[in-house]
Image (spheres, rainbow, N blue to C red):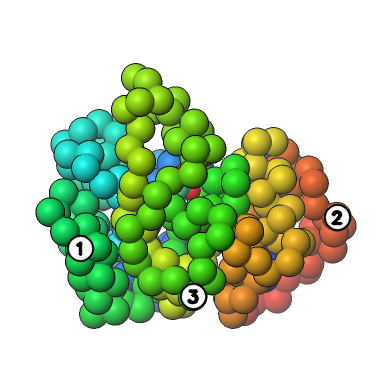
Amino acid sequence: MEVVITDHPELVVADAVAEAITGGATTLGLATGSSPLPTYRELIRRHREEGLSFANVTAVMLDEYVGLPHDHPESYTRFIHDNFTGLIDIGDVYLPDTMSDDPKKAARDYDELIARVGPVDVQILGIGSNGHIGFNEPSSSLTSRTRLKTLAERTRLDNARFFDSLDEVPRHAITQGLGTITEARRLVLAATGEGKAAAIAAAVEGPLSAACPASILQWHAHATVVVDRAAAALLRDVDYYLNAYEHKLAR
Ligand code: GLP
C-alpha cells in the first residue's frame, strides 16, 4: 500500500484517474461524500480546460441509501449527477436499485452487473470516521458482496449534517461489499481533516480487521491512501511515507 501525504490530495487522486483513462481505462468506481468532491472539481476542470474525455468510461457507484427517492437532494444518485457525472461527457452511470420492493435481490443484481461491466479500473474511496468504506460498517465481512446494510448510528450522525434532521437520515443502504470493492484493479482512498485521523491510522497501520473495514486496502495489490497532514496526524511512519513518495519510481 502506498501512503501519500500532501496538501493537495485532490491532485494526486485526479492524476491517478486521468492517467488510467488516458491509458485506456473504461470503468471508474465512484464514491460520494465530501472527501472526493475536490477531486471531482479538479477532473471537471481538466475536462473543460484540458480536454480530458470520459466518453469511453462507464461509472459504477459504491452505494446508495435505501428508500430515498433518486431525485432527493441527498440521494447519491442526485449527488454524483450534480457534482460530477452530469458535468462531464461520461457514458453510463450505474447505481443499485434502492427503490426496489426487494432490495436484497437488487443488491445481488448490482453485484452481478459490476461483474459484467467490470472489473473497475480505478475505484475512488472515502472513509467514514468509524473506518467504513462504502457503507461497510465495522464488523463487515472482509469478503462481503454487494448487499443490504444497516447503517451504524455514528454514520447516521456523521451524515445528518446533509439532512434537515437525524430522523431523515435513512437507516439502510445497498453497498458494494469489501470483496466486491477489492476486485477493482486499483483503489485510491482520499481523506482530509483531523476527524479522519483515527480511522486512517487504523486502516493503514492497524491490523487487517473487520473492526476497521478500510484496513482491507492492506490486502489489495494496488492501493493508495492519499491524506492531508491533519488526516495523517496519528500515523507512526510518516517519515517513510514522505520519503518513499519523494523517491517514487514509475510503477
Ligand atoms: C458515507 C459514504 C462513504 C464515504 C463516507 C465519508 O457514509 N457512504 O462512501 O466515504 O460517507 O464521507 P465524507 O467524505 O463526507 O466524510
The residue tagged with tag 3: helix, strand or loop? loop
Tell whether label 2 touches label 1 (CB within 8 Å). no
Q: Is residue 12 above or below residue 77?
A: below
Q: Residue at position x 30%, y 34% from top?
A: 74
What's the amino acid at mark 3? Answer: Thr
Q: Residue at position x 25%, y 70% from top?
A: 108
What's the amino acid at mark 2? Answer: Arg
The residue tagged with tag 1: helix, strand or loop? helix
Between the C-alphas of marks 2 and 3, the distance is: 28 Å
Q: Which mark is residue 143?
A: 3
Q: Which circle's residue, 1 or 2, is located before the other in the chain? A: 1
Q: Position of residue 7 (x, y in %)?
A: 67, 42
Q: Quick check: 24 left or right of 99?
A: right
Q: Which residue is mark 2?
A: 236
250 or 227, which is in the foreground?
227
Instruction: Tell me which corner region of the image, top left, top right, bottom left or bottom right, holds residue 109.
Output: bottom left
Instruction: Determine crowd level at label 3: few under 14, some 14-19, many 20+ residues with C-alpha closer than 10 A.
Output: few
Q: Residue at position x 12%, y 54% from top?
A: 101
Q: Which circle's residue, 1 or 3, is located before the other in the chain? A: 1
Tell whether label 3 touches label 1 (CB within 8 Å). no
Check the picture and name the quadrant holding the C terminus.
bottom right
164 or 31, which is in the foreground?
164
Between the C-alphas of marks 1 and 2, the distance is: 42 Å
Q: Position of residue 134 (x, y in %)?
A: 44, 55
Instruction: Determine crowd level at label 2: few under 14, some 14-19, many 20+ residues with C-alpha closer than 10 A.
Output: few
Q: Which residue is mark 1?
A: 106
Q: Which circle's residue, 2 or 3, is located before the other in the chain? A: 3
